[in-house]
Image (spheres, coloured by chain):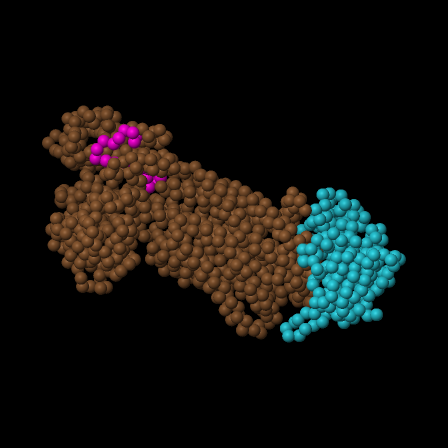
C-alpha cells in the first residue's frame, strides 16, 4: 500500500474539455479533479465514450484542456509550452499504449533504446538490453515489430516505458489488443516492474482483472468522475 | 542533447530507415535525379565540345587570325607558349601555267601541322580513291584540286608553273578544311609548301596576300588566348572562331544546345516531382514515429534538427551515388557514341559532377524539407488517436525554396533569361491548368454514380481526398507527359528538325550572274536534272547612315558590328517573304503594299548594329544614297542553306541600280562535270561550294539527335520514378482500406475492380492532362523555341489516355496485389 503521506505526484484540478463539431459544442470532460500519490496504482474505468482516453491524454500533456490544470511532480503542466511539456514527459513519464506504438522501421532493441537516445543518455544500448532481458525478450533483440507476436510487442513497449525509469507511467488499455492469457501475462509484468521501480501507475482499462490489482479505481461516466 | 549526440542519433535513424526500406524510394529519386543531371551535364559538356570541334573542322582550326599584312610573330610564339598548336598559312591569287594555258587559281602555302582541325584528303590520280593526306606537299611539289587538274589537263609527268618556279603535281586534293565563302572560293586551288614560296617570287609588297594564323587546342586555352590576343590586334585584323565565321553552323550549334538543355531541364523537373512525392509518402509513414518521439520527450526543434541532419546525410550519400552513376553512364555513352560516329570525345570536366551533386542536394532540400517540417508539427495526441494527422499539409508556399531552386536551375540551364522565364512560366501555368483540369474531371466522374459497389468505392476514394488525388494525378500527368513527349513527340521534333535541312539542301551557290544570263542559267541547270533554282537579284551597298546620323566602324565596340560596317552589304528585293524567313516585328509589304522605300532587316543584324523599327537606313549604292525606313524585322534560318539577305527592299527601290543575280542549288555528289560545263558556258560566274559545310552541319545534327536520345533515357527513368512514386504515395491507405473491405467480406474480384476503377480513372485523367500538356509543350518547343513548323499528332491523346489508364491500373493493382494474397490481420499489423 502506498504511503498516505507520500508526496502528490499528479494533481488534476477542474479539468474540462469541450470540442466543437460543426455548430454543436460537445462536452467530453467536465470538472474532473483528483490526486495521485507517488507509488500508487490507479485505474480509470468507464464505458466507451466516457472520456477515459481524453483524460489520459490531458494528464500526460498530449492535448490541451478547455478548463482546469494538471500538475506533475509540482510542475503546472499547462503553464509550460508544448516543448516544455515534451521535456517534462521525457524526464518523468512513461507510456504503454493499446496499439503498442512501436516504430516499424526499428528492431526491438532500437525501439527500447530510442527514449534514452532522445534524452541524450550516453550509454543507451546496455540498459535497453537489460530491460528487454527483464521482460523475457533477450532472444528477440533484433526482431522487427512485425516479426513479433502481439504479446511480445507489448512487452517491448513495456520495456521501452520503464527503461528511462519514469516516476509516472500512463497505460492506455494495455491489454486491449491482446487475448486474455497474453493480456494476463503482460499485466503481471507491468505490475512487477511497477513494484520493482516504485513507479506511479495510472491506467485506463476495461479489464476487471486489472482494476482488481489497483490501489484505487476512478469511475468516469459522461465526462464526470463518479463518487 | 549535444550536437555530436544528435548527429549520431540522426545517423542511426537514417541507418534504421534505410535498413527497413523506408527511404529506398526517396533515395532512388535523388540518385536518379543526380545521375540524370550529372550525365546530362557531362554529356552536354562533352558533346557540345565535340560539336564545336566538328564545327572547327570546317574552319581548319579552333581560331583563325587573318590580315592582309604579315602577322606579328609574337602571336604564334604566344600560342606555342600556351601549349596551343599554331601554323601559318598564306593565301593569294595567282596564275598557274602549263604549256600554253594559264588559269587563275587560289594558292595556299602551308606549313607542317596543317590542317590543325579536319582533314585534307588527296587522291593519287584524278577521280581516283582518296585518303587522308596526313602531311603537306614536299618541296618542289604542289597538290592541285580536281578543277585545276581538269582545266589545265595535267598529265602524269607535267610540271606546272607558278611564278618563277615549276612544280611537280604530287596529288589531287579532294577535300580541304577551311573553305570560306568569298570571291576566290570559286577558283581552282593549289596547295604548296611554304618553303617553296620565296623562290616563286609571288609574294611582293602590294601582292594580294592573306596571312592566316591557325590556332587549335584545349577550348579553355583557346578562349584564354583569344582574350589575350584580341586587344593586341590592330583594327582590320580578323580573329574568328567557327561561330563567327559561319551563320549556318552557329545556328545549328545553338539549336543543338537548346535541345540538350531542354532534355536536362525535363529531367530536373521530373526529379523534383519524384522527390516531392517520395518525401510526402515518407511523411505519411513517419507521423506515428514522430508523435511517439514527441510523446517520449523530443522537442519540435530537436525533431526538425534530427531530420535535417538525416536528410542532409542522405542527400550527400545519394548525390555521391548519383554522381558515380552519372560518370559511369557518360563513359558508356562515350563508347556508344564513339562506335556510332567515330569521334574522339574530349575528356569531361569535373564541373558537371559538382553541378549534379549540388542540384540533387538542393532539390532534396527544396522538396523534401517542407513535408519534414510539417512532420515535426504532428500532434502528440496521435499516439492515442490515430486519426489525427498533420494540422495542414505543406502548402505551395512551403515549396518556395524548391521552386526557387527549380527556377534557378532553369535560368542556369537555359542560359538565357527570356527563355528561362518562358519555360518557368509555362511550367507553373501547366501545373495550374493540370490542377484545374483534374478538379473538373473529378467532379464530372462524381456524377457517374450507381455502377456497382466496386465502382462506387473506387470513385468515392478519389473524391474523398480531392487534394491528394489532384496531386497524384498531376504528378502522374507530369510523368506520362514526359514519356509522351519523349517517345512520341521527340521523334517528330527531331525528324522535323532534320528535315529542315533535307539531304538535297542546296550545296552550291552561284554568284555574279548577269541579268541577261538569268534565263539561260535556269535552263542550263534544268536540262541537267537540277530543279530550276530561284534566282535572286543582288545590289551591293555600304551602310552609311542610320536615321540621318552617319555611321562608321568607330561607332561600334563590337567586332562583328565593325566588320559589318566596313564591308558592302548584299541588298535584294522581293515581293514574297522567303519560306525560311519569319517576321518578328512590323509587317511584310505584301500585306501592306504601297511605299517602295521600305527595308526588312534580319533580326541578328539589327541587334548587332542597333537598328530598330522605324529607323531610316541609308546605303551608298554605286555612289548614290538610297534611303528607306525599316518596316519589319525578320528571323532567318541560316542553316537552311538557301540564299538569304540581311536587308531586303520591296520592288521599285533598288531595281534601277546595277544588279547581279545569285542562286543556290543541290548538285548530287560526283557530278563535277556539270560545274566544269557551267563555268565554261558562263565564264563570268563564280561558283561557291558549300557541300562540306552542308554535310558537316548535317553530321552535327545527327550527333545532336543521338545525344538527345541518350539524355532522354534518363528523363524516361525519372518519369518512371515519378509514376512509381505517385502510385506508391497512396498505397498504404489503399492496402488498409482493402484489408478492411476483405475483413467485411468483400471478394477479391470486388476489391480488384474497385482498384481498377480508382487507378484506371486516375490514370485516364492523368493521361488526358498529360496529352494536353505534351501537345502544348511540343507546339511550344517547335514554334517558340526551335522555330520549326510542327503539327501535333492527334494519336497522342488516344495513347495518353488509354496508356495512362492501363499503365496506372496495371501498376496500381500490381502494387496492391499483396492485399489479395495475404491474411488481412497480417496486413493490418504490418501497417501498424
In the rendered structure, does residue A127 fall within the stretch colored magenta?
Answer: no
Which residue occupies the extreme right position in the image? A1
Residue A183 appears anywhere in the view = no
Q: In this view, does A33 lie above or below B70?
A: below
Q: Nearer the viewer, residue B469 or B761?
A: B469
Q: Nearer the viewer, residue B477 or A196?
A: A196
Q: In this view, does B452 lie above or below B778?
A: below
- Where does the image place residue B493, in percent across and percent down from the top left? 38, 54
Q: Is residue B481 left or right of residue A100?
A: left
For chain B, what colour was chosen?
A: brown
Q: Which quarter of the image is occupied by the C terminus of chain B?
A: bottom right
Q: In this view, does B813 lie to the left or right of B654?
A: right
Query: For the point 72% across and 54% down, which residue is it?
Result: A88
Query: For the point 36% across and 49% down, which residue is it?
Result: B255
For chain A, what colour was chosen?
A: cyan
Residue B821 falls in which quadrant of the image? bottom right
- Where does the image place residue A148, in percent across and percent down from the top left? 74, 52
In the rendered structure, does residue B71 fall within the stretch colored magenta?
Answer: yes
Query: For the point 38% across and 54% down, which residue is it?
Result: B418
Residue B648 falls in which quadrant of the image? bottom left
- Where does the image place residue B48, in percent across and percent down from the top left? 39, 43
Span of residues in magenta: B53-76
Amino acid at each position: 500500500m502506498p504511503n498516505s503521506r507520500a508526496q502528490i505526484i499528479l494533481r488534476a484540478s477542474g479539468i474540462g474539455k469541450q470540442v466543437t463539431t460543426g455548430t454543436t459544442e460537445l462536452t467530453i470532460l467536465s470538472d474532473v479533479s483528483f490526486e495521485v500519490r507517488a507509488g500508487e496504482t490507479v485505474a480509470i474505468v468507464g464505458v466507451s465514450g466516457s472520456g477515459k482516453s481524453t483524460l489520459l491524454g490531458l494528464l500526460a500533456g498530449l492535448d490541451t484542456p478547455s478548463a482546469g490544470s494538471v500538475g506533475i511532480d509540482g510542475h503546472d503542466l499547462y503553464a509550460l509550452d508544448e516543448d516544455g511539456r515534451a521535456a517534462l514527459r521525457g524526464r518523468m513519464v512513461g507510456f504503454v499504449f493499446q496499439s503498442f506504438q512501436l516504430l516499424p522501421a526499428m528492431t526491438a532493441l532500437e525501439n527500447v533504446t530510442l527514449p534514452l537516445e532522445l534524452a541524450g543518455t550516453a550509454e543507451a544500448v546496455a540498459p535497453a538490453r537489460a530491460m528487454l532481458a527483464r521482460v523475457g525478450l533477450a532472444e528477440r533483440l533484433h526482431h522487427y515489430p512485425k516479426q513479433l507476436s502481439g504479446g511480445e510487442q507489448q512487452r517491448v513497449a513495456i520495456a521501452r516505458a520503464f527503461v528511462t525509469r519514469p516516476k509516472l507511467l500512463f497505460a492506455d488499455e494495455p491489454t486491449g489488443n491482446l487475448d486474455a492469457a497474453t493480456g494476463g501475462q503482460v499485466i503481471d509484468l507491468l505490475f512487477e516492474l511497477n513494484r520493482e521501480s516504485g513507479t506511479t501507475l495510472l491506467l485506463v482499462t476495461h479489464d476487471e482483472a486489472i482494476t482488481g490489482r489497483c490501489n484505487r479505481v476512478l469511475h468516469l461516466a459522461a465526462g464526470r468522475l463518479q463518487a | 542533447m549535444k550536437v555530436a549526440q544528435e548527429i549520431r542519433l540522426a545517423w542511426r535513424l537514417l541507418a534504421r530507415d534505410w535498413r527497413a526500406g523506408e527511404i529506398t524510394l526517396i533515395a532512388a529519386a535523388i540518385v536518379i535525379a543526380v545521375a540524370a543531371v550529372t550525365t546530362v551535364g557531362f554529356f552536354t559538356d562533352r558533346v557540345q565540345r565535340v560539336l564545336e570541334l566538328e564545327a572547327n573542322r570546317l574552319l581548319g582550326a579552333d581560331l583563325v587570325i587573318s590580315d592582309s599584312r604579315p602577322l606579328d610573330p609574337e602571336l604564334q610564339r604566344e600560342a606555342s607558349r600556351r601549349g596551343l598548336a599554331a601554323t601559318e598559312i598564306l593565301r593569294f591569287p595567282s596564275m598557274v601555267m602549263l604549256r600554253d594555258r594559264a588559269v587563275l587559281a587560289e594558292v595556299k602555302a602551308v606549313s607542317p601541322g596543317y590542317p590543325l582541325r579536319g582533314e585534307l584528303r588527296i587522291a593519287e590520280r584524278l577521280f581516283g580513291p582518296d585518303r587522308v593526306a596526313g602531311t603537306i606537299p614536299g618541296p618542289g611539289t604542289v597538290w592541285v584540286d580536281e578543277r585545276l587538274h581538269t582545266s589545265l589537263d595535267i598529265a602524269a609527268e607535267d610540271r606546272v608553273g607558278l611564278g618563277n618556279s615549276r612544280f611537280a603535281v604530287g596529288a589531287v586534293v579532294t577535300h580541304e578544311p577551311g573553305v570560306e565563302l568569298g570571291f576566290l572560293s570559286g577558283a581552282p586551288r593549289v596547295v604548296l609548301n611554304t618553303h617553296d614560296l620565296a623562290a616563286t617570287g609571288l609574294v611582293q609588297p602590294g601582292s594580294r596576300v592573306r596571312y592566316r594564323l591557325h590556332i587549335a587546342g584545349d577550348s579553355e586555352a583557346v578562349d584564354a588566348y583569344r582574350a589575350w590576343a584580341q586587344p593586341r590586334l590592330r583594327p582590320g585584323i580578323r580573329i574568328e572562331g567557327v561561330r563567327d565565321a559561319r551563320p549556318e553552323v552557329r545556328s545549328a550549334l545553338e539549336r543543338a544546345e537548346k535541345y540538350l538543355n531542354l532534355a536536362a531541364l525535363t529531367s530536373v523537373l521530373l526529379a523534383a516531382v519524384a522527390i516531392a512525392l517520395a518525401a510526402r509518402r515518407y511523411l505519411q509513414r513517419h507521423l506515428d514515429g514522430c508523435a511517439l518521439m514527441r510523446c517520449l520527450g523530443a522537442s519540435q526543434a530537436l525533431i526538425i534538427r534530427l531530420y535535417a541532419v538525416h536528410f542532409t546525410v542522405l542527400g550527400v550519400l545519394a548525390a555521391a551515388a548519383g554522381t558515380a552513376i552519372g560518370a559511369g553512364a557518360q563513359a558508356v555513352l562515350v563508347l556508344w557514341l564513339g562506335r556510332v560516329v567515330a569521334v574522339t570525345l574530349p575528356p569531361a570536366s569535373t564541373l558537371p559532377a559538382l553541378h549534379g551533386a549540388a542540384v540533387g542536394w538542393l532539390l532534396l532540400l527544396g522538396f523534401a524539407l517542407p513535408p519534414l517540417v510539417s512532420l515535426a508539427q504532428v500532434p502528440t495526441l496521435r499516439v492515442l488517436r490515430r486519426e489525427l494527422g498533420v494540422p495542414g499539409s505543406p502548402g505551395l508556399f512551403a515549396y518556395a525554396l524548391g521552386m526557387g531552386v527549380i527556377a534557378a536551375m532553369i535560368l542556369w540551364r537555359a542560359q538565357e533569361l527570356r527563355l528561362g522565364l518562358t519555360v518557368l512560366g509555362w511550367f507553373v501555368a501547366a501545373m495550374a491548368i493540370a490542377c484545374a483540369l483534374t478538379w473538373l474531371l473529378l467532379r464530372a466522374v462524381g456524377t457517374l454514380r450507381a455502377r456497382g459497389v466496386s465502382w462506387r468505392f473506387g470513385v468515392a476514394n478519389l473524391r474523398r481526398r480531392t487534394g491528394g488525388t489532384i496531386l497524384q494525378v498531376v504528378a502522374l500527368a507530369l510523368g506520362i507527359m514526359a514519356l509522351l513527349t519523349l517517345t512520341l513527340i521527340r521523334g517528330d521534333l527531331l525528324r522535323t528538325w532534320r528535315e529542315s535541312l533535307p539531304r538535297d539542301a542546296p550545296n552550291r551557290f552561284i554568284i555574279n550572274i548577269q541579268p541577261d544570263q538569268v534565263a539561260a542559267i535556269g535552263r542550263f541547270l534544268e536540262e541537267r536534272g537540277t530543279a530550276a533554282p530561284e534566282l535572286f537579284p543582288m545590289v551591293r551597298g555600304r551602310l552609311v547612315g542610320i536615321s540621318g546620323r552617319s555611321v562608321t566602324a568607330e561607332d561600334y565596340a563590337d567586332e562583328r558590328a565593325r566588320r559589318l560596317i566596313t564591308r558592302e552589304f548584299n541588298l535584294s528585293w522581293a515581293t514574297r517573304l522567303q519560306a525560311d524567313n519569319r517576321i518578328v516585328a512590323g509587317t511584310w509589304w505584301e500585306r501592306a503594299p504601297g511605299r517602295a522605300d521600305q527595308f526588312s532587316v534580319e533580326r541578328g543584324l539589327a541587334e548587332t548594329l542597333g537598328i530598330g523599327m522605324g529607323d531610316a537606313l541609308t546605303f551608298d549604292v554605286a555612289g548614290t544614297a538610297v534611303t528607306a525606313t525599316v518596316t519589319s524585322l525578320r528571323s532567318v534560318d541560316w542553316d537552311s542553306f538557301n540564299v538569304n539577305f540581311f536587308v531586303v527592299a520591296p520592288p521599285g527601290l533598288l531595281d534601277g541600280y546595277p544588279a547581279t543575280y545569285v542562286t543556290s542549288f543541290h548538285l548530287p555528289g560526283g557530278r563535277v562535270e556539270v560545274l566544269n560545263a557551267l563555268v565554261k558556258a558562263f565564264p563570268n560566274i563564280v561558283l561557291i561550294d558549300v557541300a562540306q559545310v552542308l554535310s558537316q552541319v548535317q553530321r552535327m545534327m545527327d550527333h545532336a539527335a543521338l545525344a538527345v536520345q541518350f539524355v532522354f533515357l534518363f528523363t524516361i527513368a525519372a518519369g518512371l520514378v515519378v509514376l512509381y512514386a505517385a502510385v506508391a504515395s497512396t498505397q498504404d491507405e489503399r492496402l488498409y482500406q482493402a484489408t478492411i473491405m476483405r475483413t467485411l467480406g468483400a471478394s477479391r474480384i470486388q476489391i480488384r475492380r474497385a482498384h481498377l476503377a480508382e487507378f484506371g480513372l486516375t490514370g485516364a485523367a492523368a493521361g488526358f492532362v498529360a496529352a494536353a500538356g505534351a501537345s502544348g509543350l511540343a507546339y511550344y518547343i517547335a514554334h517558340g523555341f526551335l522555330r520549326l513548323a510542327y503539327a501535333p499528332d492527334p494519336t497522342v491523346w488516344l495513347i495518353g489516355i488509354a496508356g495512362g489508364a492501363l499503365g496506372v491500373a496495371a501498376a496500381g493493382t500490381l502494387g496492391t496485389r499483396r492485399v489479395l494474397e495475404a491474411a488481412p490481420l497480417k496486413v493490418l499489423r504490418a501497417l501498424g
